[in-house]
Amino acid sequence: MVYTAKQHRALASAAPALKATLARAFQTQNGGRVPGESRDFKQSRAAQNHQRWLTRGARQGGGRRNNAAFAQMLSSTSGVRGVLPSFAPGMRNWSQTPASSNVIAPRGFGFYDAFAHGPHETATALSVGPATPIAAPTIAVAITSSTNNVAIPGIGTYDFGVRMMIVFPGPCACQAVSLYCSNSIPTDPTGKRYYTSPPLNNPGGAPEAAMATRCSLRIRNITQLISQGGTVRTLRVTTGFALADIEAANQDFVVFCDHVRNHERTRTYSGASLADNCQINCTVVDQPRATTFLPFENTSGAGSPFHDGLLQPTLTPIILLFEPFGAPAAIDQDNTYEVTIRSQFLAHYVQGSMLANLAMSIPDMPTTTLSKHRNDEENKGSMLHKISDFVQNVGPYVPGIARGMRAAYQAYRPTVQAAIGNSARMLPMLGM
């Protein structure tokens, strides 16, 4: 007689004197109420009916269903309510296929997708101790400019219209910067604009130190459809560079733009192809620094954490290059792009503060296991991904994702409640 997993656990935990009685009860239960049919026979018959249903569905669907691949998919389970899934080696929570996982977004952008996962849904390759997970949204806007090329002796054609946006989750309020040629003088500094996250720009709520865990951006061309055009290039940078040298002079900026255009991993898109939301994620470029808390400073100039982070990045900076589009007189042909940035950090706050009391122990997992998720993200290179494709593929698995998110919330809720309760008990001692 074949026992279910639940029956096996009951037999294993039963007292020795009750094992035989419990086994006979399970045998009677598994025998079923239909005369002549045991539980094993009914399971076999159900499996045959399921296989016939798959075959019929393949014929009706034009043969697009892969029965073998579909049958090999692992089952999707949310686990025990209120218990954090294990990150131990060999556990299926992080090693199962993306199509069946309730922890990693199925068929989506993986572990490093900051839009699909909250800041508390993270793990580190090494133990980093208690920290407070936070999210930092940022909205940036890029407007292409009409080309106004001028020949500069020794430099060649001057691209006044090109604009560059650099996104990087530095331990500061600044999360992106936009650069462009300020004028026709090669030695003048470039024009620039920093984009900061409002939650991180609050001096009273800034952390003492932070570690970036995720950063994703979504880009969309919000220009009216009839005027959409031009060229946008994307590059996920894996080598540090000095932003101060690039913005020091217009001529240096033009040379750097040319390096981006000619990079092997650079990908090129038309403005019309970005009418729908497209996404790209940062991934780990320096594993030791990616597990180090760096001092948080609310500055954005030279020597700031944003500049230093680009020189020695922990996560890959993302460069968006907006090429000039339209003639000088055709101002109405300029395209406008909305870039939504979502950065996530593990933060350290002043001891005794409210956010410090909300710190939780961050689960760590072996580097070999976490490396698989990093490699999956690295293999995507500098390509953008259509959000609509992700939504279409993830549709059948949304209920499973919701169950996983609820399980994660239930796992962390006791920790949060305990921290709030401890703070409340300390108030009378502080005379408050």
Image (cartoon, rainbow, N blue to C red):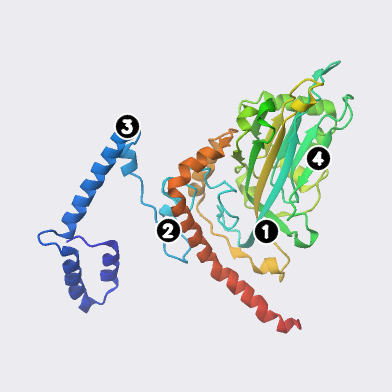
Q: Label 2 sits on what residue type?
A: Ser
Q: Secondary structure at mark 3?
A: loop
Residue 15: x, y in percent? 26, 77
Q: Which of labels 3 and 2 is toward the front?
A: 3
Residue 134 visible in the shown view: yes
Q: Label 3 sits on what residue type?
A: Gly
Q: Nearer the viewer, residue 189 or 125?
A: 189
Alpha carbon of mark 4 to alpha carbon of mark 3: how far? Answer: 53 Å
* Residue behind mark 4: 193
Q: Secondary structure at mark 2?
A: loop
Residue drawn at x 33%, y 36% is: 66
Horizontal side of 327 relative to 126 (left or right) equals right
Alpha carbon of mark 4 to alpha carbon of mark 2: how far? Answer: 45 Å
Horizontal side of 147 relative to 289 (left or right) equals right
Mark 1 residue crowding within 10 angstroms, few (<14) / some (14–19) / many (20+): many
Point out which mark residue 63 bears. 3
Q: Are marks 1 and 3 in contact (CB under 8 Å)?
A: no
Alpha carbon of mark 1 to alpha carbon of mark 2: how far? Answer: 28 Å
Q: Label 1 sits on what residue type?
A: Ala
Q: Quadrant of the C terminus?
A: bottom right
Alpha carbon of mark 4 to alpha carbon of mark 1: how far? Answer: 26 Å
Horizontal side of 233 relative to 15 (left or right) equals right
Mark 3 residue crowding within 10 angstroms, few (<14) / some (14–19) / many (20+): few
* Residue behind mark 1: 347
Residue 93: x, y in percent? 44, 54
Q: Are marks 4 and 1 in contact (CB under 8 Å)?
A: no
Q: Are marks 1 and 2 in contact (CB under 8 Å)?
A: no
* Residue behind mark 2: 78
